[in-house]
Amino acid sequence: MPKTEFETQVLREMRIVLKDNAENIQKEIKDELITWTEFEELYAKLDNFEYPHKDKLLEFIKYFFLDHIVSENEVVINV
């Protein structure tokens, strides 16, 4: 599969997962920016989520929504 098709597919799947869980995400997130650890915890609790490569999708979300790097252990994403 060409890279552009793969990225398009991943973006489509990310949108579906995040859209389906938008209400739960909004309840949990108080700020526009959150740390990666906070998002990982939230991501682990998402409902109605049957993506076969959940860990891989998490890494793609990090890549596409990364806002800035605070330190080696703390990145902030824009949700």
Image: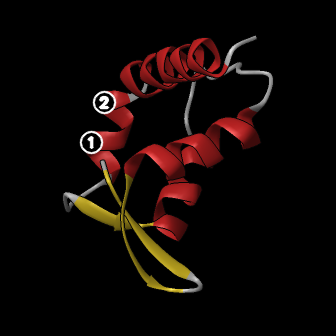
Q: Nearer the viewer, residue 21 or 63?
A: 63
Q: Position of residue 65 (x, y in %)?
A: 39, 49
The residue at 50%/80% (across/down) is 74
Residue 26 is labelled as 1
Residue 23 is labelled as 2
Amino acid type of disc 2? Glu
Q: Left or right of 16: which side holds 51?
A: right
Spatial CA span between label 1 and label 2: 5 Å
Q: Position of residue 44 (x, y in %)?
A: 63, 47
Instruction: Give the answer, above or below, for where 71 lies relative to 66.
Output: below
Q: SS for tag 2?
A: helix
The residue at 56%/46% (across/down) is 43
Q: Nearer the viewer, residue 8 or 59?
A: 8
Are discs 1 and 2 less than 8 Å apart at CB? yes
Q: Left or right of 77: which side holds 16?
A: right
Q: SS for tag 1?
A: helix
